[in-house]
Amino acid sequence: MDLLIELFSEEIPARMQAQASADLRRLITEGLVEAGLTYASAGAHATPRRLTLSVDGLTAHSQPVREERKGPRADAPAAALEGFLRSTGLTRDQLELREDKKTQVYFAVIERPGRAAEAIVAEVLIATIRNFPWPKSMRWGAGSLRWVRPLHSILCILHDEAGARVVPLEVDGITAGNTTQGHRFLAPARFAVHSFDDYVVKLKRAFVVLDPAERAATIWQGATNLAFASGLEVVEDKSLLAEVAGLVEWPVPLMGKIAEDFLHLPPEVLQTSMKEHQKFFSVRNPRTGRIEGFVTVANTETADQGATILKGNQKVLNARLSDARFFYENDLRVAKAGMGEWVEGLKSVTFHGKLGSQADRVARIAALAREIAPLVGADPDIAEAAAKVCKADLRSAMVGEFPELQGLMGMYYARAAGMDESVARAARDHWAPKGPDDAVPVEPVSVAVALADKIDTLTGFWAIDEKPTGSKDPFALRRAALGDLRVTETNGLRTPLLPLMAYSWDELRGQLEARYNVFVLQEKTDEGYFVPRLSATFPEFTGGREFEVLCVKSQTANEQISAQRYSQAYIVDDVRVAEAIVCKLPSFFIPDLLAFFHDRLKVFLKDQGIRHDVIDACIAMPGNDDLTLLVNRARALAAFLKTEDGPNLLAGFKRANTILSQAEAKDGVEYSYGADVKFAETGEERDLFAALDQAEALITPAMKSEDFGAAMTAMSALRLPIDAFFNAVQINTDNPVVRRNRLNLLSRIRTICAGVADLTRVEG
């Protein structure tokens, strides 16, 4: 038999419809299966006023169930027996005593008869309605039921060869039936249905298209036909199309023109204003790129073919676009004056309580962009200038109205200010990529500012210990790291991260010192970057607080620090502020931040079919803060391991490494040099010496030029000589000279292979 359910209500918000239909399908089908029914298929649909579920091939009855449960022993405490009885729903005289491993044990035999589908469907549907997971719900009238909007009717019928019958159920005074209602205005009368196919056909006659995909296709086809007839084209917007399809049950596209007064506005402004305020599709002139028209989607047919609807929409649109024009023209006046008003205004815009204002952030980004510029082929002066205005449009009226236009409006305003075109494009592109499918910046100035922006964000939040945890990432730091990675990889940049992060931290540290009179003790590492160090604590000067980074508030403490050979220290005016800003700095947050980049790299390369262990083998090599180097090495190693020689050579390397490591541990020495072919006793040994010499001669220059593919091709030639060596030779021979020579030969294998990647981390 087949089941049809419809839950008819006031308008369901478009953004909730897809999830609601999926939830209805899941909850009903899971409930039916759990109760013992099976089905062939199920499909769910949503319109603005209804959720519908059809289930085909539903069994008429659940099967009888006989279940045996083993309980406590006969001599078990009474409490154990009582708990078992509660769990089974039986009484003591209904239990059976059986022999089990030389003792008697209670067994419960639970028999449940089959139930009719009607009873199960009613039970499951009532539970689903009462516990439906709406993001927001409401109560109305005097009832207790909560639904997204007032629920008006429930249609629930079972259909088989004998015909259709209503499943008897009632929820909060709403009794299930076999009738529904069509379009609110075009066909408001109720009508009866007897199957899903009958339901779909009668709904369409009543001006309701049930399938959201069909409504979307109707909208798009109608809109493109209207635009084509005028020599125009509709700007594709899949999210808007899905939303509008959730706003109408009987879509009727109508096209109007934008008044001449507004055509000078940037196309993105027109498009955003119409989408956000009116849910209009933008219509573009393909010859000029201007947005010249719009398509609105009515939910009804009218005798005047929508003329009245268009007139009303045009009036509202003109008011909206008048606001946009006012914002834009006022913004242009500020922009033409150089945007200084906005740049100054960033001082009053807080970026983060512990990281200062947007102006503070811009100063850090500008300094870092200047540092990055030579590494990416950009002019340092232009990169710095671009960074100084890249956030200016945040103070503009247009971005205040439409935050999604940030960066894009910056480009228009930079052009209006007469700035270099690369500065304008950097203002637009430095936000990118915002998502995994977005294009990345490729122009040098844009690349420099984009990298600086993301590195400053990551370094700052790591410094104040606001890292992502689990699924929580309120500051989108994972996206920032992945964006940095994509910009670097796409442009083939050789920009080591460690010195850039250290430079970024140094800029932030300087701002903190200046703002709060806090001195952060640092130590320069061998790699050339600074890290904060855990320093001595002085509880007597800090109210019992212990700081990771030394913060003092008296001259006496300052003198004590100097006496302990710290070169200098500063007085802290406000210990509480100092603690909030500085004391949470981890001792080694920069390496930890690099590890975060590596984790993002694993996610990035996993989508390309590269395993985590392969990436780990490359991360273990020097230069692992050079993301381009790391990606190239990982791709080459992954490709090598997919060849026939790759896994076999890996096995040979691991065998050599295991034997060598065990011998070194046993003997307490390192076998790392001194292998000499004159001590070779077999042809296989001599062949391996020759193969290693030849491979080394090819691998060394290949690695120097970072041609990992060539290096691994040369390494693959070692496979057969290594296999032959292990098959013919006993390493731990009784002759100590020969044994030492063979172990040193294994060391050569390990050294040559380890120069490409840390193969010990690659799984077999």
Image: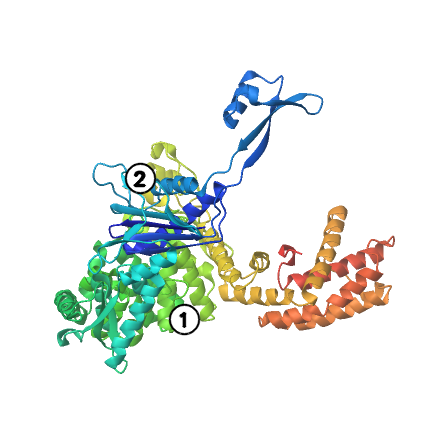
Q: Amino acid at mark 2?
A: Val
For marks 1 and 2 on the same chain, the one whose residue lies earlier in the sequence: 2
Mark 1 is on which residue type? Pro
Say the numbered circle drawn on residue 374: 1
Residues packed near mark 2 inside 10 Å, few (<14), some (14 to 19) or many (20 plus): some
Front disc: 1 or 2: 2
Residue 434 higher or lower than 59, as above or below: below
Q: Residue at point 27% right, 46% down?
A: 151
Residue 687 located left or right of residue 749: right
Q: Position of residue 289 (x, y in %)?
A: 26, 78
Q: Is residue 183 above or below residue 421?
A: above
Q: Is residue 670 left or right of residue 571?
A: right
Question: Which residue occupies 38% across, 59% down?
Answer: 197
User: Does the CB distance between marks 1 and 2 fall below 8 Å?
Assistant: no
Q: Which residue is mark 2?
A: 171
Quarter-wise, where is residue 248 in the image? bottom left
Is residue 34 at all visible to an observer of this figure? yes
Quadrant assignment for the C terminus: bottom right
**Which residue lies at the image location 25% right of the left edge and 71% below the top edge?**
282
Q: Which mark is residue 100?
A: none
